[in-house]
Image: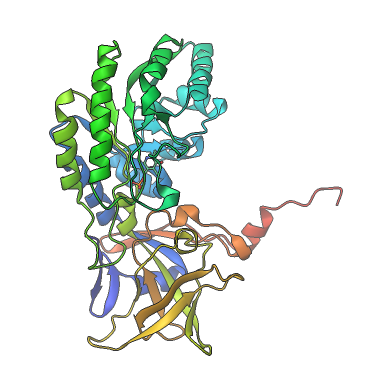
């Protein structure tokens, strides 16, 4: 459920008509609902009760500092994959004890900064990383708390590019070698083993792969404890999917996910961490754009809009579907027309939807892309010298720009011409 509904014929974000935001900010822009973000975070938190738990928002899905502050103030932890994300979480007021550091390519410089600033744990993904962390932490005279990201060899049955838990994927250490690597970790200076980590993929629409992975995790915890390790924390990763097509999809709910987690892992006496990104931020955001032209070609009709693949890359990169709706509610029973919705960028990849049945929308009118709050603004760029798309946060009847659109001068001023040119 989200808070983007038609009221009096106009699409609102909570109590604000999004056309009013468009008039103030210009298009395209991202619009987030504070109530939806909070609601989704709290659903996860409640789903794990009464187990001791920390819901760590996956910062890579939406890293705006205002979004992080909103969630951090509710008690969220943060899952970061770079020191840049770590610094964003800290700038949002989240203490280091609530930040976990994931990712296959942490550099020694990033490790040092996280240890200096305070960190809950490193989710270590390889033996070379373990050795690098041991060297950095021992040189600083501290012990780095770690989990090992274990690859359970489970197929998440999701999109190829976001599946991460099969043995051919680049993530984690193979579960078959986990005991050996834990023994090595325990023997290294500057390393303190505290738990086990897994993350098998994103946009999972079925609980079965999670359950298969967590069942393997459970057996591993028992083995590791028998080997003498202290395992007090289980990081279960993120990955729960959201419905991108209204009325057609019903992925599992956080409460169902939580019940499964409690059933499979609840009696191990561990603190549970989860790292949801998409399910918290995805349906909490829309991208709003204006139609520039309707263009009739021989075989089809194009809706050319002022948003492009640089603003929302998911359709071009993953072939993803986003529902696209007019901001003015179409009259009931109005016929739909099949159109290709495209952006202005000079490549055919800049296509949001092909032969999409949509109500008739004319040049100058506004459309919104649903479910664009995750992996939307964070993946935007200035390709074609289109200034970075702005972000707006709505709460109740007010809104604020939380990342302004740069002016053309600001965009150009970031380049510098060397003195010798
Ligand atoms: C991407 C990622 C997540 C979040 O995935 P969602 O599908 O957005 O929930 C969590 N943990 C790790 C390690 C990730 O790489």
Q: Is residue 228 left or right of residue 356?
A: left
Image height check: is 49 above or below 192? below
Quarter occupied by the N terminus: bottom left
In the picture, residue 90 is in which quadrant? Answer: top left
Image height check: is 338 above or below 273? below
- Front residue of 393 and 123: 123
Horizontal and vertical percent for residue 404?
49, 58
Horizontal and vertical percent for residue 27?
47, 70
Horizontal and vertical percent for residue 314?
45, 60
Image height check: is 194 above or below 59? above
- Front residue of 373 and 348: 348
Which residue appears at 35% of the width and 81% of the height?
358
Which residue appears at 65% of the width and 61% of the height?
409
- Whether residue 75 can be seen here: no
Residue situated furthest right in the rendering? 420
Image height check: is 181 above or below 80? above
Q: Is residue 334 left or right of residue 337?
A: left
- Front residue of 152 and 5: 152
Horizontal and vertical percent for residue 280?
30, 50
- Front residue of 164 and 63: 164
Where ligand 1 lies, by quadrant? top left
């Amino acid at each position: 459920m989200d808070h983007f509904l038609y009221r009096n014929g106009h699409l609102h974000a909570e109590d604000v008509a999004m056309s009013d935001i468009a008039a103030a900010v210009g298009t395209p822009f991202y619009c987030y609902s504070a109530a939806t973000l909070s609601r989704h975070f709290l659903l996860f938190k409640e789903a794990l009760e009464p187990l001791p738990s920390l819901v760590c928002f996956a910062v890579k899905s939406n890293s705006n500092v205002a979004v992080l502050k909103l969630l951090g103030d509710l008690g969220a932890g943060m899952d970061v994959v770079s020191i840049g994300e770590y610094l964003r979480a800290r700038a949002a007021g989240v203490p280091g004890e609530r930040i976990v550091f994931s990712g296959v390519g942490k550099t020694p410089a990033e490790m040092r900064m996280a240890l200096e600033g305070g960190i809950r744990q490193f989710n270590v993904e390889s033996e070379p990383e373990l050795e690098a962390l041991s060297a950095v932490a021992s040189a600083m005279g501290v012990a780095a708390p770690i989990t090992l990201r274990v690859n359970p060899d489970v197929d998440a049955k999701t999109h190829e590019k976001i599946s991460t838990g099969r043995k051919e994927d680049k993530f984690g250490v193979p579960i078959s070698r986990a005991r050996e690597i834990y023994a090595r970790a325990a023997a290294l200076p500057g390393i303190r083993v505290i738990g086990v980590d897994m993350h098998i993929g994103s946009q999972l629409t079925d609980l079965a792969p999670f359950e298969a992975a967590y069942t393997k995790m459970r057996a591993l915890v028992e083995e590791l404890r028998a080997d003498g390790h202290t395992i007090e924390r289980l990081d279960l990763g993120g990955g729960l999917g959201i419905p991108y097509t209204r009325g057609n999809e019903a992925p599992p709910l956080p409460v169902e996910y939580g019940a499964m987690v409690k059933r499979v892992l609840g009696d191990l006496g561990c603190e549970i961490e989860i790292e949801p990104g998409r399910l918290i931020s995805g349906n909490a955001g829309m991208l709003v754009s204006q139609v520039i032209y309707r263009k009739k070609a021989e075989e089809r009709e194009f809706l050319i809009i002022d948003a492009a693949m640089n603003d929302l890359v998911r359709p071009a990169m993953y072939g993803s579907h986003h529902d696209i709706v007019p901001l003015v509610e179409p009259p009931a029973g109005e016929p739909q027309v099949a159109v290709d919705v495209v952006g202005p960028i000079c490549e055919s990849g800049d296509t949001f939807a092909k032969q999409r049945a949509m109500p008739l929308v004319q040049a100058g009118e506004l459309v919104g892309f649903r479910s664009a709050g995750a992996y939307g603004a964070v993946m935007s760029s200035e390709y074609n010298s289109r200034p970075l798309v702005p972000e707006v946060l709505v709460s109740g009847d007010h809104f604020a720009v939380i990342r302004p659109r740069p002016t053309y001068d600001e965009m150009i001023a970031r380049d510098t011409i060397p003195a010798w040119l």
